[in-house]
Image (tube, rainbow, N blue to C red):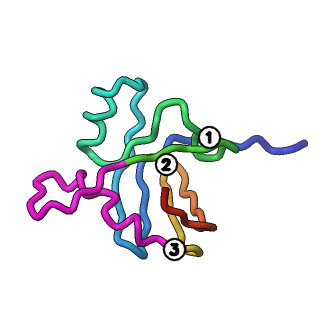
Amino acid sequence: MRPSLETATPTRIVIDSIGINTTITSPESTDVGVLDRALQSGAVRYPGSGLLGESANMLIFGHSSYLPVVHNKAYQAFNELGKVTRGERITVYSDAHTYTYEVTSVRMA
């Protein structure tokens, strides 16, 4: 018998090599206003996208701002994301587990 995989909602993302360490919220609604408010506290997992432990794509998004004065640091959550390179580790936490991923490719869209 194959063991079942436990799925979990992400709560934090850390990429030590580029200094990213921010919370992740998972709102229930895809309403733009709800998502916009969630971005005020860090990164956001798009509702309906995959969960940790699932064989599915998870969409996590956040702000980046290079303005000289930013009062809410959540608006700089992903500032250095463009510096991530192949082979680096991304750690995503849930309330009960830690998941570590390795970057296999990087492309600019």
Please, is residue 29 above or below residue 42 in the view? Answer: above
Q: Residues within 10 Å of mark 1 (few under 14, many from 20)?
A: some
Please identify, in this view, whether the residue under mark 3 or under mark 1 is nearer the observer. 3
x, y (%) of residue 18?
Answer: 38, 73
Residue 10 x %, y %: 48, 46
Q: Which of pointers 3 and 1 lies earlier in the amino acid sequence?
A: 1
Q: Determine the CA span between mark 3 and mark 1.
A: 27 Å
**Residue at 56 percent of width and 42 percent of height:** 8
Whether 49 is among the magenta residues is no
CB contact under 8 Å: marks 2 and 3 = no
What residue appears at the point 23 percent right and 52 percent down from the top-left corner? Answer: 75
Look at the numbered disc 3 and give the secondary structure of its residue: loop
Which residue type does callout 2 highlight? Answer: Ser
Residue 5 horizontal/vertical position (percent): 71, 43
Q: Marks 2/3: CA distance? A: 24 Å
Q: Residue furthest right?
A: 1
- The mark total stands at 3
Q: Which residue is mark 1?
A: 7
Q: Residues within 10 Å of mark 2 (few under 14, many from 20)?
A: some
Q: Evaluate if marks 3 and 1 touch, with contact meaning CB atoms under 8 Å apart.
A: no
Q: Which amino acid type is marked by label 3? A: Thr
Work out whether mark 1 precedes mark 2 in sequence or the reverse, and give the earlier one: 1
Q: Circle 3: is it few (<14), some (14-19), or many (20+) Cα within 10 Å?
A: some
Image quarter in which the N terminus is found? top right
Q: Which residue is mark 2?
A: 94
* N-terminal-most mark, 2 or 3: 3
Q: Which residues are magenta?
A: 62-85
Name the residue at 51% across, 44% down: 59
Above or below, 26 relative to 3: above
